[in-house]
């Protein structure tokens, strides 16, 4: 599967079918800090992503001082 | 995973509420959370006129969208900070949103207002850009709220923001700042606008999900000055705790406001007065904003280097 990560923008390729939870763990991303989407659909941690699919990890945390 | 409300397929899990929601149920849930915060903290009266601070990012546009849907009479206020590669896009998204919903929007250009952009201000005062930025935002927003005759200013600070600010203030025991950390700051002086934070029960993750599901197009990029900001570190630490122990973030802030802040506020006595230079509210003779602007004006920039112009003081 292809995982598009933003900030910095990069694409990672992972083998096999996996649950979203496992994808985030593998990439060391805290699930509390992102939203994962497949196209326009929001995915939950137990959703399975197929070998040929592409998902996107949208960062939620912003950090201005004020 | 199933939606806790309708049993349909869930789109988002909210572990601190021990719940998951499908898209439509989540939108209703989040709007109710905001409405409840507004009512329980007496932030706004029904259908009240409110000035909404909008940067064009997910939080402020989520706030504007929800307030609009809840029937408040909103006007947007956007501060163009003049930060290259960042400010133009945020302004564009804000203007596009206002236009799409035919909502009034006031834009203040910091450069036009002060003579300097935020980066220039930082360079001239030799302070981190965020310090001049925060000060200018508070000052200009307060002034715009009063000038427009708005009873209240709403900002998009979310649960992650207030928890991280609280964490930083506790880490350094900033008791004065801590005593002011409430979701509502009342107008305790004729020149001080009431400010409210309706998103204090909403995490950044939920604000992103809300914008995606409602089709609100927000500015996704970060301000270049935010990289490495300590606030990000605090948010990271808090979210690591939250991942293991859901609900910690909300309890940390809410219980502070309920149990600790009142004691701290009771010990604080501040006398507010009007600034000798600009007439806006301050504790000293000249407000922090006027002092910063004076400092910035006294500095001249030569060949890319900043030099302080020493003012000659004539002998008495
Ligand atoms: S990161 Fe700093 S300079 Fe950038 S908008 Fe936030 S406070 Fe202003
Ligand atoms: Zn549902
Ligand atoms: Zn002043």
Image (tube, coloured by chain):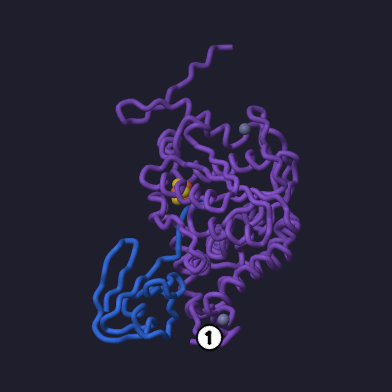
Tell which quarter ligand 3 is in: top right
Picture layout, residue B296 above or below residue B47: above
B136 sits left or right of B151 in the view: left
Could you tell me if residue B115 is visible in this image? yes
Quarter of image, res B118: top left
Residue at x 43% of width, y 71% of height:
A35
Secondary structure beneath dot 1 equals loop
**Could you tell me residue A27's position as x and y percent?**
32, 75
Image position, residue B152 (x, y; %):
69, 49
Judge by depth and name the residue closer to the eye, B96 or A43: B96
Chain in blue (letter): A
Residue B283 shows up from this direction: no
Per the image, the residue denoted by label 1 is: B8
Q: How many marks?
A: 1
Query: Label 1 CB, ligand 2: below 8 Å?
Result: yes
In this structure image, what is the colour of chain B?
Answer: purple
Q: Quadrant of residue B77?
A: top right
Asked whether B56 or B162 is in front, the reply is B56
Classify B105 as above or below B120: below
For residue B257, which quarter of the picture? bottom right
């Amino acid at each position: 599967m292809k995982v598009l990560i933003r900030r910095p923008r990069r694409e990672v390729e992972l083998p096999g079918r996996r649950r979203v939870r496992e994808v985030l763990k593998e990439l060391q991303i805290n699930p509390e800090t992102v939203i994962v989407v497949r196209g326009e659909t929001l995915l939950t941690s137990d959703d399975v992503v197929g070998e040929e699919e592409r998902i996107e990890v949208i960062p939620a945390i912003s950090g201005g001082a004020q | 995973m199933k939606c806790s409300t309708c049993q349909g397929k869930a789109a988002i899990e909210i572990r601190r509420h021990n719940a998951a929601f499908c898209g439509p149920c989540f939108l209703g849930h989040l709007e109710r959370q905001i409405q409840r915060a507004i009512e329980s903290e007496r932030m706004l009266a029904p259908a009240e006129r409110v000035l909404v601070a909008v940067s064009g990012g997910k939080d402020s546009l989520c706030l504007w969208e929800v307030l609009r849907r809840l029937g408040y009479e909103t006007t947007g206020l956007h501060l163009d900070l003049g930060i290259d590669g960042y400010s133009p896009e945020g302004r564009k998204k804000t203007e596009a949103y206002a236009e799409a919903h035919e909502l009034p929007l006031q834009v203040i250009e910091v450069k036009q207002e002060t003579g300097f952009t935020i980066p220039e201000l930082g360079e001239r005062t030799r302070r981190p850009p965020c310090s001049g930025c925060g000060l200018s935002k508070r000052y200009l927003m307060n002034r715009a709220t009063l000038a427009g005759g708005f009873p209240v200013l709403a900002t998009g600070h979310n649960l992650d923001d207030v928890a991280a600010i609280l964490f930083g203030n506790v880490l350094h025991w900033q008791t004065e700042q801590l005593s002011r950390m409430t979701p509502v700051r009342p107008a305790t002086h004729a020149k001080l606008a009431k400010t409210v934070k309706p998103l204090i029960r909403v995490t950044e993750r939920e604000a992103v999900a809300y914008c995606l599901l409602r089709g609100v197009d927000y500015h996704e990029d970060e301000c270049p000055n935010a990289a490495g900001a300590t606030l990000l570190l605090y948010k990271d630490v808090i979210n690591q705790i939250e991942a293991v122990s859901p609900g910690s973030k909300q309890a940390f802030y809410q219980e502070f406001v309920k149990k600790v802040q009142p004691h701290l506020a009771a010990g604080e006595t501040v006398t507010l007065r009007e600034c000798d230079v600009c007439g806006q509210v301050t504790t000293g003779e000249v407000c922090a904003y006027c002092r910063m602007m004076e400092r910035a004006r006294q500095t001249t920039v030569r060949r890319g280097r900043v030099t302080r112009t020493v003012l000659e003081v004539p002998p008495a």
